[in-house]
Amino acid sequence: MTDRELVDKIVRQRQLRCYAEVMGRYGGLVYGKSLSILRRTDWAKDNTQQTFVRAYERLSDWRGDLLGPWLTTIAAHLAVRMLAKEQRYAGMEPTESALRRNEPTAEEVQVHEERLLNMEKALADLPPQDRQIVRLHYYEKKKTDEIAQLLNLSQSNVLVKLHRIRERLKARLRHERNDRQ
């Protein structure tokens, strides 16, 4: 099911279990973005939860095809606010340079969103089983032995497939980056 279809079911039909699917798909991505800014796992977990709450509240306003870039933008903004708030509570005024160091520039956000869109497109072009392996491993945090059991494959086969998938994705993204330059 596409992101657009999921959002339509959530907003129009109030099917909340579809939001669990959104969280499953993008939880790792949002957590990674949060952690890259906050540098603390406990804060990153809190920020991830806040991101999904904020996104749910504003889901009817979303206009796009892929939720990933939108969610990571929300996560980045909330993380920067969290850092500023923590600095104020610690009795320090957040300096412009400290905020600038942690807040991505508009250009960085745009480049990041382009990369995410390219990655989403590359993932969508993978064969169904490869997409499933990626989803299980990276988004659902399943171990290779669990994936092997779920997909009726050997663990070594899963490891080889993961390696080949990563190499194909890297090559495709490198090729697209070279085409833009």
Image (cartoon, rainbow, N blue to C red):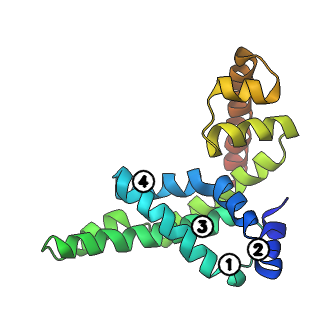
Instruction: Give the residue pinned by disc 2.
Output: 10
Q: Quadrant of the N terminus?
A: bottom right
Disc 2 is placed on an element classified as helix
Q: Given this view, does label 4 or label 2 mark the residue nearer the observer?
A: 2
| Residue at 36% in and 54% down | 42
Q: Outermost residue, left direction? A: 91
Lower sequence index among marks 4 and 2: 2
Instruction: Give the residue pinned by disc 1.
Output: 59
| Residue at 84% in and 35% down | 129
Q: Given this view, does label 2 or label 3 mark the residue nearer the observer?
A: 2
Give coordinates of residue 175: x percent, y percent: 72, 42
Lower sequence index among marks 4 and 3: 4
Disc 3 is placed on an element classified as helix
Instruction: Give the residue pinned by disc 4.
Output: 35
Residue 118 placement: quadrant: bottom right
**In the image, which disc is placed on residue 71?**
3
Disc 4 is placed on an element classified as helix
Location of residue 119 with respect to 134 vertically, above or below: below
Kind of residue at disc 2: Ile
Kind of residue at disc 1: Leu
Left or right of 72? Residue 126 is right
Decide: marks 1, 2 in contact (CB < 8 A)? yes
Mark-to-mark CA distance, 2 and 3: 16 Å
Kind of residue at disc 4: Leu
Mark-to-mark CA distance, 4 and 3: 14 Å
Give coordinates of residue 15: x percent, y percent: 78, 71
Q: Given this view, does label 3 or label 1 mark the residue nearer the observer?
A: 1
Kind of residue at disc 3: Leu
